[in-house]
Amino acid sequence: MSAITDPIGDYLTRIRNAIMAHHTIVEIPASNLKKRITEILYDKGYIFRYKFDDTPNGQGVIKIALKYDPTTKESAIKSLKRYSRPGLRKYSSANELPRVINGLGITIVSTSKGVMTDKEARQLNVGGEILCLIY
């Protein structure tokens, strides 16, 4: 088994695959960055619930309960796109952060003040690495 070179890409792919398979819960190896992204997804209403579990090896697991529309069975997350990746990092200043569908979606940015949404980064006037786009 090869080592994962892009943990955020892996995180997004696991969620994407779980949504396509209509799973209700997805388990992802934990890291502080992934925990923060999970908290943002929860705060913005893209996921139903999450839980951080410890594992014997010390890494831990993030369990995410995905959110679906009760009538249409459609996921709350329409799209998860990796923006900056290990082979091509993409950075942006606060005033040049991309807007996802005119502000309907969110951009998750890793800044010097922590991981946050594009809206929070604009308010604090900090730029950083654009991790992913979600709507």
Image (cartoon, rainbow, N blue to C red):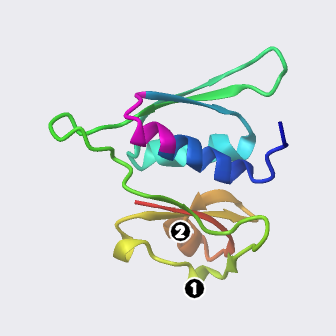
Secondary structure beneath label 1:
helix
- The spot of residue 48 in percent (x, y) is 39, 34
Please state which amino acid type lies under the numbered disc 1: Glu
- The spot of residue 47 in percent (x, y) is 42, 39
Tag 2 residue: 118
- Of pointers 2 and 1, the one earlier in the residue sequence: 1
Category of crowding for the residue at label 2, using alpha-carbon neighbours closer than 10 angstroms: few (below 14), some (14–19), many (at least 20)? many
**Residue 105 relative to residue 108: left or right:** left
Q: Residue furthest left?
A: 71
Question: In the image, what residue occupies the spot 40% across and 28% down?
Answer: 24
Q: Which mark is residue 96?
A: 1
Category of crowding for the residue at label 1, using alpha-carbon neighbours closer than 10 angstroms: few (below 14), some (14–19), many (at least 20)? few
Please state which amino acid type lies under the numbered disc 2: Asp
Q: 71 or 111: which is nearer to us?
A: 71
Please check the rendered image and state whether residue 18 is part of the magenta-colored stretch, yes or no.
yes
Tell me the distance, in whole angstroms, between the alpha carbons under discs 2 and 1. 10 Å
- Image position of 117 with respect to 88: above or below: above
Q: Residue furthest top?
A: 56
Q: Which residues are magenta?
A: 17-24
Quadrant of the rendered image containing residue 35: top right
- Image position of 105 with respect to 28: above or below: below
Quadrant of the rendered image containing residue 122: bottom right
